[in-house]
């Protein structure tokens, strides 16, 4: 960590601001998308910093199905229609 940058390799910084802009897009890219949804066709995302100029590619490389019980131990209320 130096300033606003994470360093995965000594000479390759990654901006925390860019990371914070990309994180909300990841779950959206994971869900099933309608063919007319812009997220289905836009895979290259620009860095939110206008002085940065970086472009980030978000690609789905496979599908995986998760059930709620695989991701939490909190039970759903009895009257919940989505109960597994």
Image (cartoon, rainbow, N blue to C red):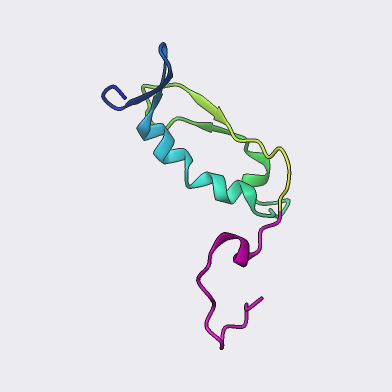
- Work out whether residue 84 can be spotted: yes
Residue range (magenta): 65-84
Secondary structure mostly seen in magenta is loop
Residue 48: image quadrant is: top left
Question: Residue placed at 65% from the left, 51% from the top?
Answer: 37
- Work out whether residue 38 can be spotted: no
Q: Is residue 49 or residue 78 the one in the foreground?
A: 78
Q: Is residue 59 or residue 53 the one in the foreground?
A: 59
* Residue farthest left in this picture: 3
* Residue farthest front in this picture: 73
Indicate the position of residue 30 as horizontal and vertical percent values. Answer: 63, 49
On screen, residue 52 above or below 79: above
Residue 80 is left or right of residue 21, and the answer is right
Image quadrant containing the N terminus? top left
Question: Residue placed at 47% from the left, 43% from the top?
Answer: 23
Indicate whether residue 80 is drawn in magenta.
Answer: yes
């Amino acid at each position: 960590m130096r300033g606003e940058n994470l360093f995965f390799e000594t000479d390759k910084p990654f901006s925390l601001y860019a990371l914070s802009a990309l994180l909300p897009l990841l779950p959206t890219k994971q869900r099933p998308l309608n063919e007319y949804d812009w997220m289905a066709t836009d895979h290259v995302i620009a860095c939110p910093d206008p002085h940065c100029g970086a472009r980030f590619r978000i690609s789905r490389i496979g599908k995986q199905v998760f059930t709620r019980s695989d991701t939490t131990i909190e039970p759903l209320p009895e009257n919940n229609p989505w109960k597994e």
